[in-house]
Amino acid sequence: MGQNRFEDENKRITDFYNDVLVQCPICCKKAFAKVDHELQKARLFCTQCAYQKEISTETTTLGIKAHWQMAAHQYFNAELWLQHGFKNDLFFAYNYEHLNYLERYISATLRVHKDRSHFTLLEKLPKFYHEAKNREALLKIIGKLKIT
């Protein structure tokens, strides 16, 4: 059996912030939250029930009012669509690109890390994502999330 190789692309969690799959606050179906930090606008829309909301990215965090750069769903306090409980933890992905990246990492039997700087997505993942003993269960979760 050959080794399944994953080469770290040094992606950061912020690489997946702009387009996030969420649960629609009206119909509970899959909806989309998008943020454009240059325009300082965030938008949530549902293709199922036609719900739409657009807001400014200006928020108050820790008493400071500013245009904070957060994941798109956070501007609406929206529930992530791609999430599943795992033991006492929560497995999640912001979008299918994020989910596919995690799947490639988790499924790999050989993981190659290049010049990481302590700020990459993989370095910030909880321990259970890295453990080989969780590989099969996590890949089953990913498989379920891919068809939602």
Image (tube, rainbow, N blue to C red):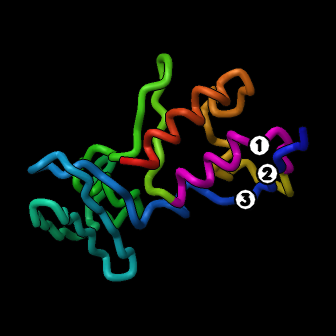
Residue placed most toward the observer, 113 or 109: 109
Dot in front, 1 or 3: 1
**CB atoms of marks 2 and 1 within 8 Å:** yes
Q: Label 1 vs label 3: CA separation?
A: 16 Å
Which image quarter holds the N terminus?
top right
**CB atoms of marks 1 and 3 within 8 Å:** no
Q: Where on the picture, by quarter, is residue 137?
A: top right
Left or right, 145 with reference to 110: left
Q: For numbered disc 2, what is the local secondary structure?
A: strand
Residue placed most toward the observer, 83 or 70: 83
The amino acid beneath tag 3 is Asn
Q: Position of residue 15 (x, y in %)?
A: 55, 63
Magenta residues, start to end: 97-112
Count of numbered marks:
3
Q: Label 2 vs label 1: CA separation?
A: 6 Å
Hey, which residue is sitting farthest bottom in the picture? 39
Left or right, 123 with reference to 87: right
* 146 over 144 or under it: above or below: below
Residue pointed to by mark 2: 6
**Residue under the image location 41 percent in, 48 percent down:** 147
Q: Which mark is residue 10?
A: 3
Q: Label 2 vs label 3: CA separation?
A: 12 Å
Residue placed most toward the observer, 61 or 72: 72
Q: Position of residue 14 (x, y in %)?
A: 53, 60
The amino acid beneath tag 1 is Ala
Residue pointed to by mark 1: 108
Residue placed most toward the observer, 49 or 72: 49
As for residue 36 lying within the magenta part, the answer is no
**Residue under the image location 55 percent in, 54 percent down:** 13
Q: For numbered disc 3, what is the local secondary structure?
A: loop
